[in-house]
Image: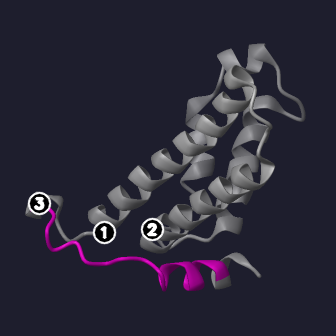
């Protein structure tokens, strides 16, 4: 499955009834992006909770659950991608290009601290919305 197919299938299961939400959020896609953002945060929290239970409470590391939470994060990313009109591949490509501009071929603390934010922004702005 490619990202276009995944996004198309994911949005079929999206709830789009935002009628009870505050009208100040507007109809410009903000509600969908908020839904995606809150969902990403929630799923990331569930991922961290599974790690917490392993590290601090001695539970077995539940890799199946971790993978499920990652899949749920993909679902919320699919909603955001659909709303912004971007594909996963394009985001992945742009992210790697940005990281190469920041670090070259390998991470270094020096490069992390002396980032060229103008160059990084130029790379990110190549994405069409």
Q: Position of residue 124 (x, y in %)?
A: 58, 50
Q: How is the image coloured?
A: one colour
- Cα–Cα gap, marks 2 and 1: 8 Å
Whether the residues at callouts 2 and 3 have beta carbons within 8 Å, the answer is: no
Give coordinates of residue 6: x percent, y percent: 65, 79
Q: Is residue 119 visible?
A: no
Q: Which comes before the other along the chain, label 3 or label 1?
A: 3
Task: Give above or below for 3 relative to 67.
Answer: below
The residue indicated by pointer 1 is: 29
Comes first in the chain, label 2 or label 1: 1
Q: Which mark is residue 84?
A: 2
Can you identify the residue that label 3 sits on?
Answer: 22
Please tell me the numbered disc located at residue 56.
none
The crowding category of the residue bearing disc 2, from other C-alpha atoms within 10 Å (few below 14, some 14 to 19, many at least 20), is some
The residue drawn where x is 28% and y is 62% is 30
Mark 3, Cα crowd under 10 Å, few <14 / some 14-19 / many 20+, is: few
In the displayed structure, 104 sits above or below 9; it is: above
What stretch of residues is rendered in magenta? Answer: 6-22
């Amino acid at each position: 499955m490619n990202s276009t197919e995944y996004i198309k299938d994911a949005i079929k299961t999206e709830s789009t009834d935002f009628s009870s939400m505050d009208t100040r959020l507007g109809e410009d896609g903000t509600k969908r992006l908020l839904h995606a953002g809150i969902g990403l945060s929630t799923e990331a929290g569930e991922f961290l909770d599974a790690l917490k239970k392993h590290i601090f409470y001695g539970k077995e590391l539940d890799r199946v659950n971790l993978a499920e939470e990652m899949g749920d994060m993909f679902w919320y990313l699919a909603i955001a991608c659909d709303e912004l009109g971007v594909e996963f591949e394009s985001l992945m490509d742009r992210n790697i290009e940005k990281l190469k501009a920041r670090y070259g071929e390998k991470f270094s603390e020096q490069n992390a601290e002396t980032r060229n934010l103008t160059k990084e922004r130029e790379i990110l702005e190549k994405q069409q919305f």
